[in-house]
Amino acid sequence: MNDLKSGSNLEKILRAGHFAFTGECGPPKGANVKHLKEKVAHLKGKVDAVNITDNQTAVVRMASWAASTILIQEGVEPNFQMVCRDRNRLAIQSDILGVYAMGIRNMLCLSGDHQSFGNHPQAKNVYDIDSMQLIALVKKMRDEGKFINDEDIDAPPRLFLGAASNPFAEPFEFRVHRLALKIASGADFIQTQCIYNMERFREFMKRVVDMGLHEKSYILAGVTPMKSVGMAQYMAKSVPGMDVPDSLINRLKGAGKGKAAEEGIKFAVEQIEEFKEMEGIAGVHLMAIEWEHMVPEIAERAGVLPRPEVS
Amino acid sequence: MIVADRKPIQEILEMVKDYERVLILGCKGCVTVCNVGGDKEVGILASILKIARKKEGRPLEVHERTLERQCDPEYIDQVKDQVSQYDAVISMACGVGPQFLSEAYPQQRFYPAVNTTFFGGALGHGVWVERCAGCGTCLIHYFDGLCPIARCSKSLLHGPCGGSAKGKCEISKDVECIWDKIVRKKMEEGRIEDVTRIRPAKDWRTARDGGPRKSVREELVQ
């Protein structure tokens, strides 16, 4: 195992063949470190790494690198997210060196939601490079020890490199090819968008397996438990690239008053059970949005505890 | 062509509030084609300004003229005896016009009556769309003549992103996802390999990012 790319816990878990289980946490909309630590405490020991989002939905929050370093202090491994929306290649590369220097070992490369979604729609958008080029850039820094301009790096950053995939965006037939390109660009692991349409996801994974992509990268299935019928309807209608079938909305409705959240958790647990058996899936990425305190229960019910110890 | 929109009348009235005698200068180039700054629009703006100022009890004397173009010294020269006769001059050309005028006649004040928006074309009567970002290094041949720099909200070179749905961009249902169009065409025509390769990071030096641009063609310079 001395050929590890980063030596992160997540990498070791996946390399050892364990079914990975990652969580997610949004940094505070302010400098409320106490609140961040409280949220993270729910995840400690229950997941292999925690994604720290980077100004998600283009709303300003504490820097993802800073929140990630707070996680390290708390004994929780972060998966540092970086979007291309807010930085040019200078800032991107210096941030990468910075996060590595601070002990961060996982990084997820994203394009980022367009700034028109968020609370600073007047902002200039950067997009100097896109997520595909970001993946290639990090890989080059790590494996070749070179910046994007081919200059040598003194002590390259060793990061376990992740990318996102949305199997439900369109055109559906192209999605697997875009995933293949991310993997070819250097993605060691993939975390998918929240999955609700299981039928479509099975079809997607069949294509992934047919192309052998699961042998080149670790694919973690994205799960976000629905808290309410309203949340399901909102995601179905207003979140671009989200596929929430009516059957799930009806199931939540059918659960009865005050029981939709429990039904949402049941669905998530069923999903995780299926992902454990699904060919090509190496783990689950649980995005319990502002519901971190439910993660231990979901993990317990899904049978993914205790988390394996790897060294 | 260069597409523009007229500024709100209130903004133009505010610009000329201290003046009594102004000249409105139209342009027969792009802004005539996109119905914002040609002869006709100069006449309309003149009428509106005169009526508004008359209502205020402070009449404004407005003269009208439309030049062949405002992006060429040859035509800018044509108003050299005229501009000094006014308190101010309103240009209805794109952003180039008031600048060429200001540089040629530094003693006079020039005001823009339009907001210059983009390089584009007309989809139909009254509808213009952006097609070029003027990035200085054209790549559209890789994408069957569709430009992701100008037409993708994130200028991605590897799309479509996860926000693409039903052929629309994540920012608005009124914005088409150009990457959806690009990859569908490639797939239909069996040329998917064109969009499943990694393209290098774009060199933005030829775009605005490299500073103000200048084009010199030696064979034409006298």
Image: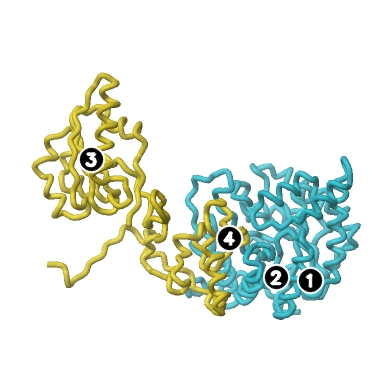
Chain colours: A cyan, B yellow
Residue under the point 53% across and 58% down: B176
Q: Identify residue type, mark 4.
A: Gly
Q: Are marks 4 and 2 in contact (CB under 8 Å)?
A: no
The residue nearer to you, when weighing A180 against A139, is: A180
Q: CA distance from mark 3 to mark 1?
A: 65 Å
Chain hosting mark 4? B
Q: Residue furthest front?
A: B125
The answer to whether residue A158 shows anywhere in this view is no
Q: Secondary structure at mark 2?
A: strand
Q: Residue furthest top?
A: B57
Q: Which residue is mark 2?
A: A189
Q: Which residue is mark 1?
A: A282
The quarter of the picture where residue A220 lies is bottom right
Q: Identify residue type, mark 1.
A: Ala
The quarter of the picture where residue B219 lies is bottom left
Q: Quadrant of the C terminus of chain A?
A: bottom right
Mark 1 vs mark 4: same chain? Answer: no
